[in-house]
Amino acid sequence: MSEGLQRIVVLGAGSWGTTFAKVLADAGRDVTVWARRTEVADEIARAHKNTAYLPDVRLPDNLTATTDAAAALDGAHAVVLAVPSQRLRDNLAYWRELLPADVPLVSLAKGVELGTLKRMSEVIAEVAECAPERVVVVSGPNLAKEIALRQPSAAVLACTDHERAVAVQHACSNSYFRPYTNTDVAGCELGGACKNVIALSCGMAVGMGFGTNTVATLITRGLAEMARLGSRIGADPLTFAGLAGVGDLVATCSSPLSRNRTFGERLGRGETVEQAQAAAGGQVAEGVMSCSSIRELAGGLGVDMPITDAMYRVCHEGGDPRSLGAELLGRERKHEWS
């Protein structure tokens, strides 16, 4: 199958979608990006740039763009879905009839859908009316700007059909991007969703003036929350020690390039969610929405996730980060692994 994945379409022209398109093009694939806005598509196709999301990055010549989804998808060997998690369902419903039969559907979205509490692979299988083994999930430390600048990075490609994951692995492997495969789709997706919430908490800690010990504590206890929830839904515990778990968590919680961490910093300095959103150009960090769905999912399964609960109260109930921080420290003492 790997030899056949030559013509690949990326639906979504944001920073990560454009970066992953560049990864594929640098791996020798013929790539078309679908963009919602005409000016973005024209700039990618004519100037080989996407200055709205990746300024100062030149895109490869074998990467083009269009606003015509039907034309882009006609004859595609693989389709990459690169829209935000909470908009995936609506967009995919529009694209469903245009998708080529039996090609891999590659998900870049990280989150748990509000309302349904479904993971992104579940949303794709439901809306596209396809078998789950067609869906390949990309996770791991995926800071778009660093990858776009060809800094060495790795990722994990999760699919219940290992051969399909290997086909996508070959399609996107290049000199700076090293993908690994995994069959634990649930664990990889859950890691990608939960890390955004923990990154908010780390940003808040930095915004309140706390240092490395505090951030390290939040990362480690956040990983424990993630693993508890993953265990309850049948994920492999080893997944959370890998790229989709601790790898993604460390990158997103530590880097100023992380939208979730930066958003959290603003909240920690006393800004409201609305003020932080305005400062981010109107964009809401994924963790702000995901903390609600992840909290609901955990509550229904009886899983204790105190950091996630605290982030929900800050983002959706007007809670004060400082008082919630004291509340977390004042919780009942227990064994580390209990």
Image: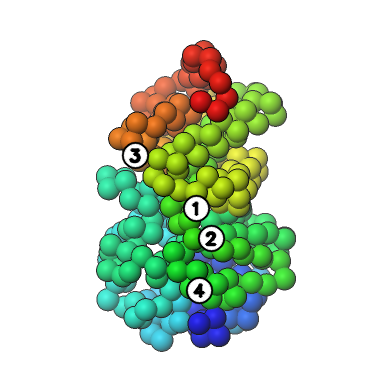
**Residue at image mark 2:** 182
Residue 254, percent from left and from top? 65, 40
Q: Is mark 3 on a helix, strand or loop?
A: helix
**Residue at image mark 4:** 163
Q: Residues within 10 Å of mark 2 (few under 14, many from 20)?
A: many
- Closest to the observer, 143 or 154: 154
Amino acid type, mark 3 = Leu
Of marks 4 and 3, the one in the foreground: 4
Q: In this view, does 117 lie to the left or right of 15?
A: left
**Residue at image mark 3:** 297
Is residue 274 visible to us here? no
Residue 120, percent from left and from top? 38, 56
* CB under 8 Å between discs 2 and 1: yes
* CB under 8 Å between discs 4 and 3: no
Please identify the quarter of the rendering in which residue 125 is found.
Answer: bottom left
* CB under 8 Å between discs 3 and 1: no
Amino acid type, mark 4 = Glu
Q: How far apart are marks 3 and 2 (CA)?
A: 24 Å
Q: Which of marks 4 and 3 is nearer the N terminus?
A: 4
Q: What element carries label 4?
A: helix
Is residue 331 visible to us here? yes
**Residue at point 33%, 36% (across, down):** 301
Residue 83, percent from left and from top? 42, 60
Amino acid type, mark 2 = Asn
Q: Distance between the residues labelled 2 and 1?
A: 8 Å
Q: Distance between the residues labelled 4 and 2?
A: 11 Å
**Residue at image mark 1:** 188
